[in-house]
Image (cartoon, rainbow, N blue to C red):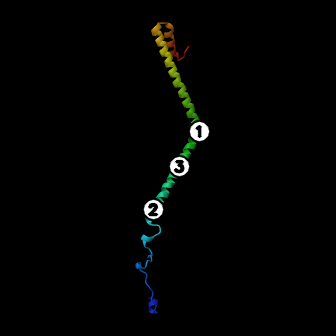
């Protein structure tokens, strides 16, 4: 080396002196494995954020459906109660006819079945 030609001794760095060698991957502050894990976590967080945004959008879009669904539910409950009441009425009229053999029960029974109207 030029310094040695002039008579100067230049100490050489080796691993025994405690100095890190340039490019030594074992002593990097952040290893490649840590970077891959960090990128994976960030991608996962991004995907979860996208899913949250999609859920919020779906909730906002479906808000206008709530009144229609409630009206449909109310109508279904009304029809179910009407069927229950008519069934009870038909059972009562059938029992009345069998028990008392009165034509009025027979007529009411068939009137409800044929027309759907109770007297």
- Give the answer, above or below, for where 56 lies relative to 97: below
Closer to the chain start, of discs 2 and 1, is 2
Q: Which mark is residue 64?
A: 1
Q: Which of marks 2 and 1 is in front?
A: 2
Residue drawn at the location 49% of the way across and 18% of the way down: 88
Instruction: Give the crowd class for mark 1: few <14, some 14-19, many >=20 residues within 10 Å.
Output: few
> What number is the disc on residue 52?
3
Report how far apart the C-alphas of labels 3 and 1 lie in the structure: 20 Å
Depth check, mark 3 against mark 1: the one in front is 3
Q: In terms of image quadrants, where is residue 58? A: top right
Label 2 secondary element: helix
Quadrant occupied by the C terminus: top right
Q: In which quarter of the image is residue 26?
A: bottom left
Name the residue beneath numbered marker 2.
36
Q: Give percent across and percent down for residue 68.
A: 57, 34
Q: Position of residue 97 (x, y in %)?
A: 47, 9
Q: Earlier in the sequence, mark 3 or mark 1?
A: 3
Distance (Cα) linking label 3 and label 2? 24 Å
Judging from the image, what secondary structure is the residue with disc 1 in?
helix
Residues at marks 3 and 1 touching, judged by CB atoms closer than 8 Å: no
> Tag 3's secondary structure?
helix
Quadrant into which the N terminus falls: bottom left
> What x and y, as percent, mark residue 98?
45, 9
Total residue callouts: 3
Residue name at image x 43 percent, y 79 percent: 17
Front-most of 96 and 18?
A: 18
Q: Residue at x 56, y 29 (%)?
A: 74
Where's residue 45, x and y in %?
50, 55
Cα distance in 3D space between marks 2 and 1 = 44 Å
Position above or below: 68 against 33: above
Above or below, 75 against 87 in this view is below
* Circle 2 residues within 10 Å: few <14, some 14–19, many ≥20: few
């Amino acid at each position: 080396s030029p310094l040695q030609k002039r008579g100067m001794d230049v100490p050489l760095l080796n691993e025994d002196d405690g100095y890190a060698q340039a490019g030594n991957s074992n002593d990097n502050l952040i290893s490649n494995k840590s970077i891959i894990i960090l990128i994976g976590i960030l991608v996962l967080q991004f995907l979860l954020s996208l899913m949250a945004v999609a859920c919020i959008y779906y909730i906002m879009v479906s808000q206008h459906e709530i009144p229609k669904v409630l009206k449909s539910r109310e109508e279904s409950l009304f029809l179910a109660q009407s069927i229950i009441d008519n069934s009870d009425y038909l059972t009562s009229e059938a029992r009345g006819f069998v028990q008392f053999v009165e034509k009025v029960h027979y007529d009411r029974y068939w009137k409800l079945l044929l027309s759907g109207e109770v007297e």
